[in-house]
Image (cartoon, helix red, strand yellow):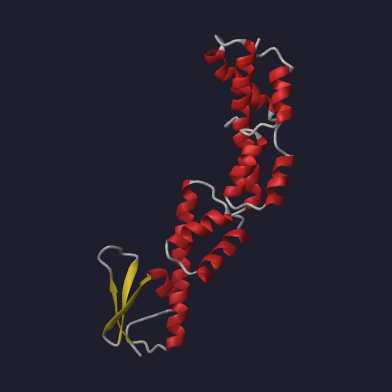
Amino acid sequence: MRITALQPQRRSKKRLSVFIDGEYAFSLDRETVAQFRLKQGQRVEEKLLAQVVEVEQFRHCRDEAFRLLSYKARSEQELRERLNRKGYSPVVIEQVLNRLKELTIVDDEKLARDYVEARITIGHKGKFRVQQELLKKGIDREKIANALKTAPDESEAARMVIEHYLPRYRRLDETTRKRRLYGLLARRGFSAETIERVLFRSNLTD
């Protein structure tokens, strides 16, 4: 087999159409072409072409992962699912994820710690709610447990929720008001201990 042409593509100057024995075979990034030193007239074997395609797929998958991460931090599982939906092979996806983990670009432990702190202090959510959200992201329980150990006290977040919603419950009798607030805090994932401490052992709702 022989490379009979390497033609620039109209839609992307970074890519070249590769023709083998006069027939269009596939397109490659210019970086891949340079990496394998491919040129017109070069004889190639199937083994080499398979390596070229594999490297190209890795580069595409890696670039897509970077694009997804540019919008927001994602867990390893979230990235795996998104890349799988894009049609990349499981083998290539794992190669990309392993590389990103080596570079600490994908780091579930750090993601869990940052997420816990942000959701409690800024999102005003309880630890149980945050735990459930992290489980949905595919982060394993051990990493979540370690992140929760260093989490800020959720009591202040619970107080912020009460202060925000209390005005709309002011006209209710005290028992009904506290029942409504209790349900609200429970749905936000605060523990019963935190709710009782903040709601019933303070004068916030008086």
* Residue 118, picture quadrant: top right
What residue lies at 47% left-to-right and 79% top-to-bottom? 51
What residue lies at 34% left-to-right and 76% top-to-bottom? 26
Residue 180 visible in image: yes
Quadrant position of the N terminus in the picture: bottom left
Q: In this view, does 185 lie to the left or right of 150?
A: left
**Front position in the image: 14 or 143:** 143
Count of all numbered marks drawn on residues in the image:
0
Q: In this view, does 134 lie to the left or right of 63?
A: right
Q: Is residue 189 left or right of residue 149?
A: left
Q: Position of residue 44 (x, y in %)?
A: 40, 88
Q: Where is residue 125 in the image (x, y as percent from the top left)?
A: 61, 32
Judge whether 103 appears above or below 110 on screen.
Answer: below
Judge whether 182 appears above or below 91 on screen.
Answer: above
**Front position in the image: 48 or 148:** 148
Judge whether 49 appears above or below 82 on screen.
Answer: below
